[in-house]
Amino acid sequence: MAVVLKKIAIFGVGLIGGSFARALRHSGSTARFVGVGRTVDALVRAQALGIIDEIAVSVEDAMRDADLVLIAAPVAQTGAILRAVAPHLQPGTVVTDAGSTKSDVVAAARAALGDKIGQFIPGHPIAGREQNGPEAAIADLYVGKKVVLTALPENSADDIARVASAWQACGAVIHRLDAAEHDRVFAAVSHLPHLLSYALVDDIAQKPHAGLLFQYAASGFRDFTRIAGSSPEMWRDISLANQPALLGELDAYLDKLQDLRQMLANRDGAALEAIYANAQRARHSWIASIEAAEQQHKQGGD
Amino acid sequence: MAVVLKKIAIFGVGLIGGSFARALRHSGSTARFVGVGRTVDALVRAQALGIIDEIAVSVEDAMRDADLVLIAAPVAQTGAILRAVAPHLQPGTVVTDAGSTKSDVVAAARAALGDKIGQFIPGHPIAGREQNGPEAAIADLYVGKKVVLTALPENSADDIARVASAWQACGAVIHRLDAAEHDRVFAAVSHLPHLLSYALVDDIAQKPHAGLLFQYAASGFRDFTRIAGSSPEMWRDISLANQPALLGELDAYLDKLQDLRQMLANRDGAALEAIYANAQRARHSWIASIEAAEQQHKQGGD
């Protein structure tokens, strides 16, 4: 039986938290949205934009009688927010988050919440835009996008359902992974590519003839390095938060590059072509599956 | 004083050679375009499409009285084409090519042409499309794009000017580098990113849980790996043709990744952030310079 949410508290009313509020309102939710955050300015703008109904004067105020709490502040603040939340966490409240890494969040939540850990359902919406802040928040950010919940053994089915239905009301598709599996997956398909892209641009930028090199860089380079335009602070935090899984993926990739280096040194064209052809085939079939999914959901992306 | 080109022979009437012919015609050239190639079918289609006026019955026929010869066949064929051309190369003919690597082409040309090497002006148009073949050829492929000429000490200024003006008539902007410099530049900004992108997709595709990983890959992964959708045969040939420079760039990149690995292992957030921030800054300023250039030329890309 679905609980009608009467009060939703959001820590961090930027793109992610603000779009969650807008999407729920758009779906017909009559909940009162209460914003909390370190930056009063952003909260005032979010209220003026109609994203939140009120600004909490304290964490205690925000938590009082909240049915659902979303932590959507920068990931480095998650631990501190959970510690601030803990003393005010009432039995009827369910807390979730939107962090890009999950094992570290689960560890922080266990430390902060103790025997209330069952009330925390870790989550990761796979959605974003280039812009940030409350002004970037839009009602359809999550339509057709994945939200991964990495539920804990202590979570009740009802509490998981409460978080899942809120995201589904935003148009998202719920996926379930355990936290370690989640972190390995995103280390491979997101965190490692970011690190590799940053590394290439830095490598080139540090060369004495960098100006000449950039002059001839073209559209292939532009696409390969688009993610190196992302926030360095955010990706520092993600790299550290997911360090064990990211190191594992980086080591596997370094092994692969050493193999390729050897093929190149040996001028082994057949071996190089086999790798390139396998990659091309895998990418084509991945793109075909995305396009099939987009037919269903009208959009994809992260 | 510009020579009016009366006969232009094109080895390979696909995207690159066909677009060259279309662009020159569009610029008002009254030259007769003669196609040569291994695939009769492509030549017949190119003639039907109005790209070439006639199909040469032999290399000798193609070369007879040609003012300009463009070799735009797959790079692996360049050496064989130059050897076939050599006995029929008349004093008034200038030969150029469109290969992505230049040191190997220069070596092949020296071996094939001997003391006629002065008549060969190596070139590399930095332009492309996803499609291939004569049907993909368009008159504006080269508008605002770079064409790099890596002229030889033996080339005469007049012969260089003949090749340069043909490309300029296509709308291209002429750049000059020496062959070794050209190959180092493109190893860094094009060939290495292709190898890295293929390596990542192959790395993921080979994992036992590849299906799960691809399921969560999103837009960042899509952009990073777009170039892994390129032709494996073509990139095998480019990798081998530019092997010395590519190995050098790969080794420099491996050193950079080892540095990053160490920072990550040490949880050195400040050092990671410094690399990420330097990359972000360099990319932003590169994009700004591209956009400024696009204002002038209306397009960029490769």
Image (cartoon, coloured by chain):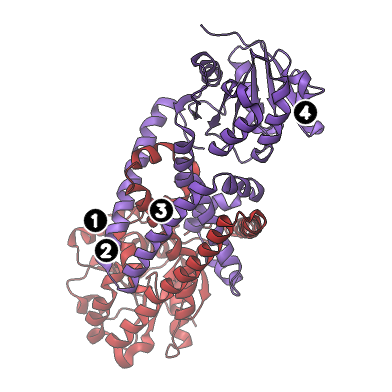
Chain colours: A red, B purple
First of labels 1, 3 by sequence position: 1
First of labels 4, 2 by sequence position: 4
Name the disc covering residue B65, or none.
none
Question: In the image, residue A88 lies at what x, y percent?
Answer: 24, 84
Q: Residues within 10 Å of mark 3 (few under 14, many from 20)?
A: many
- B62 or A195, which is in the foreground? B62
Question: Are the residues tagged 3 and 4 within 8 Å (C-beta)?
Answer: no
Discs 4 and 2 lie in a common subunit: yes
Question: Residue placed at 27% from the left, 63% from the top?
Answer: B271
- Check disc 3 and report the residue beneath it: A200
- Check disc 2 and report the residue beneath it: B271
Q: Look at discs 1 and 2 and give the one toward the viewer.
A: 2
- Check disc 4 and report the residue beneath it: B43
Compared with A18, A76 (above or below) is below
Question: Is B25 placed left or right of A70 in the picture?
Answer: right
Query: Helix or strand or loop: what does disc 3 sit on?
Result: helix
Question: In the image, residue B86 lies at what x, y percent?
Answer: 69, 25
Q: What residue type is labelled 3?
A: Leu
Q: Look at discs 1 and 4 and give the one toward the viewer.
A: 4
The chain to which mark 3 is attached is: A
Question: Are the residues tagged 1 and 4 within 8 Å (C-beta)?
Answer: no
- Check disc 1 and report the residue beneath it: A45
Q: Which amino acid does label 4 sit on?
A: Leu
- 3D distance between C-alphas at marks 1 and 2: 34 Å
Q: What residue type is labelled 1?
A: Arg
Judged from this view, the residue extending furthest toward the top is B1
- 3D distance between C-alphas at marks 3 and 2: 16 Å
